[in-house]
Amino acid sequence: MTEGKFVGLPKIKYVRAYTVRGGGADYHDQGAGHWIDDHIATPMAKYPEYRQSRQSFGINVLGTLVVELEAEDGTIGFAVTTGGEPACFIVEKHLSRFLIGRDPSDYETIWDQMYFSTQYYGRKGLVVNAISGVDLAIWDLLGKLRQEPVYHLLGGAVRDEMQFYATGARPDLAKEMGFIGGKLPLHHGPAEGEEGMEKNIALLADMRAKCGDDFWLMYDCWMALDIDYATRLAHRAWNECGLKWIEEALSPDDYWGYAQLKKNAPDGLLVTTGEHESTRWGFRMLLEMECCDIIQPDVGWCGGVTELIKIADDADRKGVLMVPHGSSVYSYHFVVTRHNSPFAEFLMMHPGPTEVVPMFAPQLLGEPVPVNGKIRASALDKPGFGVELNRDIALHRPYPND
Ligand SMILES: [Mg+2]
C-alpha cells in the first residue's frame, strides 16, 4: 500500500440561497380555506383580531429557504426549510465563508463554526433554521457524491418500513387511508373560556366516535395554553375521549411548566413537545427536567442532521422517544435508522385534507408519500435525500455572495 495524502471528496465551490413562496417547506404559506389556517389556537389568540387566522399575525411571513451547494465536480446538494429572505442573508453573507473550499465530510467542524460564529445573535429560531438548511444540504451533497442515501450514511435502516400518523383536520379520513393515528389542531384556547373548552372536547368526542376506540387521537396545541387549561384539557380529553398525547401545550420557553404538566397529566396520557426547540442544549433542558414523554425536533429547525444525531442519542439514553416534527424526507432518512423513533409524522397538506399529497410540494421532485400509512425503507434508496429541486418554481436569490 502506498502512502499518500488523503484527497477526500470534491470541495464545495458555490453556495446559493433562494427564497420561494407558496407552501413547500414553509407549509403555513397556503391559500385561503386551508385547514391549517382555520381558527387554530395560538399564543396570539388572546387578541381577538388575530384569533381566526394565523396568517393574520404573520405565520407565513418568512417563506421557504432553499440552500444549494455545488461541488467542484458540478455535483449539487440542496435542502429546503423555513427562513425565506432573512435566512438567505445569513447563509450567503455569513455562513458561506465556512463552506466554500471545504470537504462536505467535515460536517462536524462546519456545524461548530456556523453555530459558534453566530452565537452572539443566534442560538435558536431563524439563525438555527438557516444552519439547519445548510447542514441538510451538506448531507444531501455528501450522499450524492458518495452515491449513497443519507440513511446509509447514518448507519442503515433498523426496519423495512416506517409507519405514520397523520396531522390534519380529518383523523376519520386518515384512518381510512391506513394511518396509525390522527393529530388534530386544537381550535380554542384559554381566551375562549369554558365555551371553547366544550367545543374542543366535542370535536375530539366526535372524532373518537367516528374512528373507534383503538385509533390514536392527539391534540396539537401549538404553544397556546397555560398550565391550568392544559391540565384540565388533558384530564377531560383522556377520561372522555382516550386522547393519546397532548402536544406543545405551553410556550417552548416554559420548561418548568412542562415539567409540572407532565406531573399533572393522567397516567397513560403522553406529553410531547419540541418542534420549536433547538440544539443539543435546548433538548437537554427538556430531557433532564423530565418535561415530556416524546421529543419532536424538526430536523429543518433544530440544527440539521448533524445536531439531530446528538439530540436523538441523548433521548435514547434517557428512554424518551424521538419522533420528529414533519419535515418529509429529511426526517424519514433519520427515523428509519433509529429504534427510539418507532413511527413518524405525516403532515396532510391537502387543503381538505381529503387525500395524501407530497408534504413539501411543489418544491421537491420525487418526494415519497405514505401508501396505506407506510413508506418502505427501499423508497429512500437514492443518493442523498433522494429528491431533486423543482426548478419550474420561482426561485429568488436576494443576496448573491459570488
Ligand atoms: Mg405540532
Image: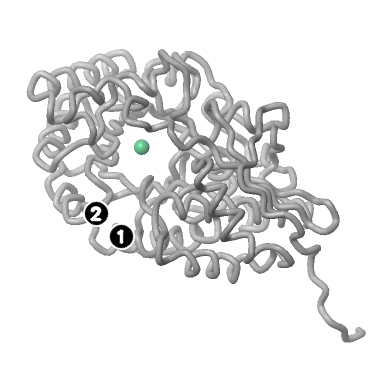
Any part of residue 283 in sight: yes
Q: Can you give x and y, in whole percent of width and height, for residue 265 in the image?
A: 15, 43
Q: Secondary structure at mark 2?
A: loop
Using the image, determine if residue 256 lies above or below residue 2. Answer: above
At horizontal 15% and vertical 25% (from top left) the residue drawn is 240
At horizontal 62% and vertical 36% (from top left) the residue drawn is 376
- Is the image coloured rainbow, by chain, by secondary structure, or in one colour? one colour
Which numbered disc covers residue 287?
1
In the foreground, 128 or 288: 128
Determine contact: label 1, label 2, CB under 8 Å.
Answer: yes
Any part of residue 158 in sight: no
Using the image, determine if residue 289 lies above or below residue 267. Answer: below
The image quadrant that residue 184 belongs to is top left
Which numbered disc covers residue 59?
none
Q: Amino acid at mark 1?
A: Leu
Find disc 2 in the rendering and name its residue.
291
How packed is label 1: few (under 14 Cα within 10 Å), some, or many (20 or more)? many
Whole-angstrom CA distance, mark 1 to mark 2, is 6 Å
